Amino acid sequence: MPTPVESLRLRLVDQVRRTFTDQASGQKPVPPSDEALFEKDTPIRKVHADLVGMMTGGVRALLLQMLHPEALQGVLDHSNFREDMHGRLQRTARFIAVTSFGHRDDAMRAIERVNRIHAKVGGMLPDGTPYSATNPRTLAWVHVTEAQSFLAGYLRHVRPDMPGSEQDEYYRQFAVIARALGADPVPETRQEAEALFRELRRDLRSSKESREIAQLVLRQRPENAPPALQAMIGAEAVAMLPPFARSMLHLQRPVLTALPARAATWGVGRTLRWAFRQT
C-alpha cells in the first residue's frame, strides 16, 4: 500500500496526465522510448520534459505566432480554436511529446500527419494575398518562436545557468523536427535564432483579430488545471514577451503580480518535477 506521500505524488501525476491527454478517446500518455529521435538526457528532452517551462513558453509562443498574418489567418480560417482551445493545446502538447520522447517511427508518423494537414490549409489574407500553411518562411516563424519560448521557460524556471553549448545543442536538435515540417530557414544556435527572429519580425502585424486571439489564449482554462495556476502561467508568459510584442497585442507587463506569479510557478515546477521524479 502506498504511503500518503506516494499517494499524493500519484494523484498529481494522474491530474497532469488527464490535463494533457484525451482520455475520453482512449489516449494514453506517451511512453519515453530508447529509440526516440533524440537520446535520453540530451537538451531537447530536458527542456521539453519540464511542464511549467513548456506551459509558460507555449503561451508565449502562441502570442507571438498570432502576430504573423499568415499564421493568424490559418487559425481563423481552418481551426475551431475558439470552441475547442483546450483540445488544440492538447494536440500540440501531444505532438511535442511524441516527437521528443516517443519512438522515432511514431514521431515521423506524427510529423507526416501534420504535413498532410498543412497541405490543406490555405486561403486569402484580408488584403487579397494568398497564404499557405506550407510556406517555409511562416513555418520558420512558428518554429523559432517555439524554440526560443520553450528554452526561455526552461531557463527562467528550471536552469538559468544552462551552458550556452547545451542551449545551442537544443536548437540543433529541435531543427530536426522543424526541417521535417518544412520550415526554412531553421536556426541551429542561439545567435542564428536571434538573427532569424529579428529578420522575421518584419512580417508581423498588429490587428484586432490577433489581440482577440491573445485574450482567448490568456483566458483559457484547461480542464483539471487550477484556474489560479493558469492565471499565473499567463502572467509569466506575458512577462516573458519582448516589449514590442506586448505593445502590438495591447498587453501590459505584469507589475504587482509579477513576483507572486514567478514564485508560484517556480514552486509548482519544483512540485511537478518531484511528482514525475525528474532531477
Image (cartoon, rainbow, N blue to C red):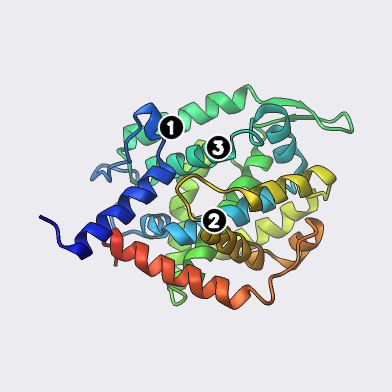
State whether residue 76 is above or below residue 69: above
- Determine crowd level at label 3: few under 14, some 14-19, many 20+ residues with C-alpha closer than 10 A: some
Q: Nearer the viewer, mark 3 or mark 1?
A: 3
Numbered disc 2: secondary structure: helix
Q: Secondary structure at mark 1?
A: helix
Q: Which of the 4 image quarters holds residue 262?
A: bottom right
Q: Position of residue 267 (x, y in %)?
A: 43, 71
Q: Earlier in the sequence, mark 3 or mark 1?
A: 3
Q: Is residue 193 rendered to the left or right of residue 28?
A: right
Circle number at residue 227: 2
Mark sitting on residue 88: 3
The location of residue 155, given as percent across then percent down, is 49, 70
State the separation of the CA atoms marked 1 and 2: 31 Å
Q: Amino acid at mark 3?
A: Arg
Residue 136 point in image, percent of width and height: 64, 38
58 on left or right of 4: right
Residue 30 lies, with reference to residue 130, above or below; the image says below
Q: Which mark is residue 110?
A: 1
The amino acid beneath tag 1 is: Ala
Quadrant assignment for the C terminus: bottom left
Say which quarter of the image contains residue 152: bottom right
Q: Is residue 15 above or below residue 108?
A: below
How far is disc 3 from disc 1 in space, using C-alphas?
15 Å
